[in-house]
Amino acid sequence: IIDLLMHFKLKGFAVINKSDLNPGITRDIKDLCKRREIEVLGTIPLSDHFFETVNSGHLPLDSGEDKLRESFDSIIKKIIFKLKEQEA
């Protein structure tokens, strides 16, 4: 995906899922994004309740896990901000 963004000269952003599962890989992804000038908008921690929540028809924000809810809330706010920036 990064190569496609670069080829078409598009701006992209990254969100790292299950970021606390392997901190080394998360760090590698962040380093790659930094080298390729791709902003990391946030990370999503591994959650036992995520799939249960989504499969029951609810949003991940409704999982009851503060850490997960805070991550999604922060990422969503950053995405909205970036979209508004592009409109201006």
Image (cartoon, grey):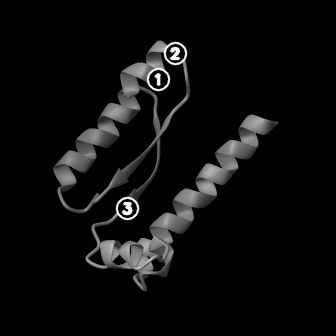
Question: Residue under circle 3?
Answer: 44
Give the SS element for disc 2.
loop
Residue drawn at the location 60% of the way across and 53% of the way down: 78
The image position of residue 26, as x and y in percent, is: 26, 49
- In the drawing, what numbered circle is on residue 8? 2
Image position, residue 56 (x, y; %): 40, 80
- Residue at 42 percent of width and 81 percent of height: 63
Which label lies toward us, 3 or 2? Answer: 2
Q: Which of the pair 32/51 is nearer the observer?
A: 51
Q: Is residue 8 left or right of residue 47?
A: right
User: Dividing the picture into quarters, in which one does residue 48 lie?
Assistant: bottom left
Tell me if mark 3 has few (under 14), some (14-19) or many (20+) residues whose alpha carbon lies within 10 angstroms of its own.
some
From what the image shows, is residue 76 above or below residue 64? above
Task: Kindly identify the amino acid type of the residue bearing the numbered disc 3.
Answer: Ile
Q: On the image, which quarter does residue 14 sit in? A: top left
Tell me whether circle 3 and circle 2 mark residues in contact (CB < 8 Å).
Answer: no
Which residue is identified by label 1?
A: 5
Between residue 29 and residue 47, name the one nearer to us: 47
Q: Indicate which disc, 3 or 2, sits on the residue closer to the N terminus.
A: 2
Q: Quadrant of the N terminus?
A: top left
User: Which of the two labelled residues, at mark 1 and mark 3, occupies the earlier sequence position?
Assistant: 1
Mark 2 Cα-neighbour bin, 10 Å: few <14, some 14–19, many ≥20: few
Q: Provide residue 79's location: percent of width, then percent of height.
A: 60, 50
Q: Amino acid at mark 1?
A: Leu
Label 2 amino acid?
Phe
